[in-house]
Amino acid sequence: MNGFFDIPSDLQHSWTGLIGLHLREALLPVAAGLLLALPIAQLCVRFRRLYPPVLGVTTVLYAVPSLAFFVVLIDYTGQTELTVMIPLAVYGLVVLIPAIVDGVRSVPRETLAAATAMGFGPVRRYLQVQLPIAAPAIIAGLRVATASSISLVSVGALIGNQGALGNLLAAAQKYDRPELAVNAVLTMAVLAILCDAALVLLRTLLTPWMPRGTRERRAKPAVRRERPEPEGAVR
Amino acid sequence: MIRIDSVTKRYPDGTVAVDRLSLDVPDRSITVLVGPSGCGKTTTLRMINRMVEPTEGAILLDGEDVRRRPVTALRRSMGYVIQNAGLFPHRTIVDNIATVPRMLGWGRRRARERAAELMERVGLDTALAERYPYQLSGGQQQRVGVARALAADPPVLLMDEPFSAVDPVVRKGLQDELLRIQDELGKTIVFVTHDIDEAVKLGTMVAVLREGGRLAQYAPPAELLSAPADAFVEDFLGADRGIRRLSFLPSAALELTTDAVVPADAPAERIAAADARHLLVTDPEGRPLGWAEPGELTAGDIRTDRLLPPGRPFVPGTDSLRVALDCAVLSPTGWAVAVDADGRVTGVVSQQAIGEAIRAAHAVGRTDRAGVAP
């Protein structure tokens, strides 16, 4: 029986097992990348001169093909998940660092000055003002990093079956079962879309303070009219 | 009292932002720092709460060097209002206002109650409490900025061009509101602006700074307008400082005449007796209806639709000589109409009489100054 969800036994996982594995291999690197990117980005904001070289280094690292990355790392970390995840985390940096830097820089100067003048120390100011205001930009970066990470995990199939759903692509060739390749591609696409949707939802929940799309904006003047404030009219 | 004691701010590249500036900021009054851009007024303000540290000199708050107090505690004891309000876009209005009380350890409930109280004080509808800043107009945001600065009831308020980014109508409203709040609360306010009109309107004392951060003159606004220290100050005050100075002279001393005021139902002999080129006709309550030449008036049947408009009236005692003069200039007859608080005519006064009052006031000003001089 060669069913669509019938996974060859040498992969040692069911279809859902592969999904779990794939998510872990894709999302852990994004999380690690974020944890790494936050302090690096903060340094880049603090010391402006650092930003161009940091951006240069991450871009060069991004240009290294993933396969070459894996081959180098096999000497150190062997044919393991870690070998797949390290390059993915590094790739995440090239998207996340600029996203965080832009986000933190987008905090209005007056807001920052007001925070300082109200007696916010640097740490409190970062955690309570800069980071929350940068959240939309950071989440935008996370969306790109997540989607690319989910697709790149499959390359891990080339180093000892560490590609999770990507392994199905190899199996499809090996057992001449093209439906496995279709399964792999579709499942990865759906995963990417679902993760993206989750991040969009997260942003919506985190940023009730952002001006929303056109529908709500059109509703706003009506709200304003109910208060007879002269300023509402002159603005 | 805040004493700025020969303070200099020199940046590493050699630029001098503030140059040996000394000022005493009196308690419970508005002191305005005004000058062109690059005169160091914002730098001076920021040295008071240590957002900028002076290179030389010291700033004393009630006799104590501000550098001897922990910087965050110092800042939390001084309200700060900035251009464009600088609100936290990610916090609701009530949370914005409650920021400093929360940092000072107030309970959430108490801080929010305080915030609601302040919204009312600055003229904001408390229905806006749960909105976010983007949902407010520029003027409303600036009110929130003032409320936020007042939240922990600090004795000192630092205001850095707070009203310069809103349009003139809103700005005037905010200025009037600030004066009203100051009447109630009596804060020690240091106010930075580049707008000399704003400085003259708000300041108890006005410090005019020139480029390079040097003090050009430090005086009450009336003195600034009547006796600018040098050509720079005179130039900065603008061409109409003479007229603006009249804002500080009361109109109560103007000699009003009632000879030319006649009620609409006046008898013929009253109109005939009136010895004036124009007569002001009033309604039975004494409110002004309009002007007419004596020959045009028929006793008992005054055609009010033929009258010239009475023009804007002024209230002696409340309005300044500037308002009285303005009323006279705008009046079709050159006579200003004086009314009481209820709008009843108390008399009329000519441009000429106002001119004499101005000359008299100037003469008094000169003898006053001569008397003070050694």
Image (cartoon, rainbow, N blue to C red):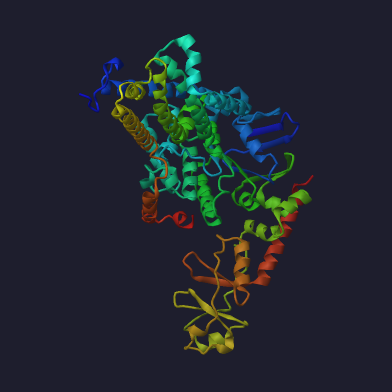
Q: Residue at x 47, y 33 (%)?
A: A134
In front of the other: B282 or A1: A1
Report the number of numbered marks. Answer: 0
Q: Is residue A13 above or below residue B187?
A: above
Q: Looking at the picture, how far across and down is residue B188, in whole percent?
A: 57, 39
Query: Which residue is at a point 48% across and 22% down the rendered structure image?
Result: A66
The quarter of the picture where residue B54 lies is: top right
Query: Residue A153 appears at what percent x and percent y?
Result: 40, 23
- Along the viewing direction, whichever of A33 and A76 lies nearer the viewer: A76
Q: Is residue A8 visible?
A: yes
Q: Residue at image x 59%, y 38%?
A: B27
B313 or B32: nearer the viewer: B32
Residue A162, image quadrant: top left
Residue B78, visible in the rendered structure: no
In this rendered view, identify the residue nearer to me: A133 or B353: A133
Position in image of residue B282 (x %, y %): 49, 77
